[in-house]
Amino acid sequence: MGYVLLVTVTLVTVTEGAELLSMRWRNIGRGHNYKPYNLATHNRIRGNGVTFTEAISRHLHLSVSINTTCVTLKIDDQLVYEGTGEAVNTGRYGALHSGVHVLVVHGGRGNLMMARQFLTYQPAEHARLKDCVASVQHGRVIVLVGVPEWVMFLGRGAEETLTSLGSRWAAKATQGEVWAWVGVVGGKTLAEATTTRGLERYPSSDLHLDVYVAKTDPGQVRCPWYTRPRMYRQATFCERYEGYGDLCTCNDTFFPETRRLQLTLTPLSSLFTGILIYPGADTRGGGDCLQALLLIQNYVLNLLVLGVLDRLLRQLFTMAGAWQTEVLVVVDGAHQETLALVEVMGVSVVIHRPEGFHNNRINANVKFALDSVFRRFAGAHKAIVLEDDLLLSPDLLRYFHQVSPLLDLDPSVYCVNAYSSNSFADTASDPQVLLRARTYPMYGWMITRAYSSEVIQKWVPPGDLRKGRDVVFPEVSRTFHSGSAGVHVTGFEQEVFFNRMIYNHLPHVDLMDVNQMIRDRYDERLTRDLKVAKTLDTLPRDLCAMTWVTRNSSRPLALYLHAEDNNDKYHSFKLFLMCLRTYDESTREIYKGVIRVRWRGTLVYLVGCPFSPFCIHNPRKNMVFKPSMGDLQAAGQARDEWELTFRPNPRLARHPDLTPDLDLNNFLTRQAETTTRSSGT
């Protein structure tokens, strides 16, 4: 007869009190469950005659589970969060559930207050992770989960943030290893675990972590302002949702009423009577206050971070013209947290039933939004459209206020953008200057009711709805794209492109005369510049050294390049755009075959010939630059050297001859040292 010997080992973790036993521990194999239990609580229970059932009722049971395809969180055995994806391995990375998951639990009620995921296997996400953690209120129970590949582009700032919470191992785990931490923001670590790996295992083994957290009083009033009758809605929101920073802090709180205190924008001239007039509640008595109409698109997709909508609204509420501006938030799906936030902020909202997937879904939502905004506000003639992942210049509304008349004066302008693709430190510097080009609405734009009706009738058809019309935009952007790992922008694009861009930080900028942007006058100004511009005799050998441009010169520089159309078939524009360190993926901002930038204070015109009508100003007639393959390769290498500035990550692999540097002294580690080394767990 055979015998089976079952040995159970109870691991006790103590995290508070000088008299308590302290033990650091880790997983050393697959499928281990660790359930830290507070000895002080156990002793108090025994001394007070409290039963085990009664004791459990006074605690929240948090259970975190991570495996190769899934991460879950259960609260009192109820599944409240799940992230799934394909299993990662050495040949496939970037699973949907990879990265860092930030989960916040209400210590009294036990509800999940926030659940956000950051794809830290891409650049740029680490900054959003850091901001997210910083926005959580002190005293909240927070669960952090790192799923394989989460350290690839974690970033030093994010590492320091996780360490400051109390984590011992967040800055030591390496690529392919999983990690979980549970604690109280501004308080103590309640539990932490990780699984390590060897060279032969990728990723590391599964991790299961159970934690009992003592409940707080669910009726506790966190902040004095909670008791004010007018603050009930905001207080209720802050007790249900987390991650909203000073909207929910006890001190220096942001209140939406701040919007009422902002300066009023007055019409600049009689031409301004055409701007987005909406007879709101305050004007029914005969007032003539001019109001701009603002539309905010909020895409509720898998990676939605609601904090950015809150940030956008707060920026709007603190700039001149805020109280004059009607705001309509268009939500793609009935997302309760978004609707609750919009109610607290006191703005209008409409809900779109999602249609299609990915780009088709976004296109359908934009169409619905444009139709909704003009239906909702029958007196509006123009609308400003913003995406929720933008940072706004403090003069954004003032900027649109000043440029608005152009949409009435010049029928060849169909849109006003707040964003410029060439708004980089080297290629833009004057926030007063306006430009025009054959481009698209993007990252903050204004159109008329008439144009909206036109495009809605023929939404996303084959062909070009611009019909030879242009967009007006600033030299220095009024918006900054701050999202990453989204539908259109990856973390890599955000880091190497968008994060290098600049936008205006001045609250009061008087723009150049908008009348100069009318097509005929704009052509005249461009002609004057090209007639006096300096040209190059030959193409410089080391083109990207930029020694051929005199800085801060009062005389423009014109380069005539070989181009048969806007498509840049011969990469003539691309060659110079790469060296100028600006947007080079396409000729996005081109006007009649001309791209204009301001390289460190000097105007530079790239003129495509024979395509552009402005080629007639070439003093060397048919002499144009046509890049060779060698020119493009050299420029590409210089561009790569400029872009590739990521800090090397020393934690992408473990040294095969060294034990994991996790500073562990658990007795199980020493007893199982041989097993640990051989199994790679």
Image: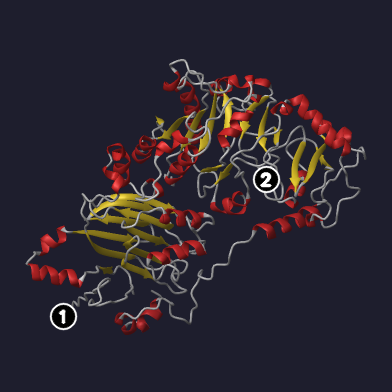
On the rendered image, what quadrant is the N terminus found in? bottom left
Horizontal side, residue 265 vs residue 25: left or right: right
Determine contact: label 1, label 2, CB under 8 Å.
no
Q: Residue at x 31, y 39 (%)?
A: 231
State the image coordinates of residue 452 (x, y, percent, origin top left). Answer: 55, 23
Q: Amino acid at mark 1?
A: Gly
Label 1's element?
loop
Horizontal side, residue 499 vs residue 85: left or right: right
State the image coordinates of residue 77 (x, y, percent, origin top left). Answer: 22, 55
Label 2's element?
loop
534 relative to 169, above or below: above
Q: Amino acid at mark 2?
A: Glu
**Which image quadrant is residue 661 in?**
bottom left
Residue indicated by mark 2: 585
401 relative to 99, above or below: above
Residue indicated by mark 1: 2
Q: Residue at x 73, y 58 (%)?
A: 638
Asked whether residue 290 appears in the rendered view, the answer is: yes
Which residue occupies the extreme left position in the image? 49
Q: Nearer the viewer, residue 469 or 637?
A: 469
Distance from Cα at disc 1 to Cα at disc 2:
72 Å
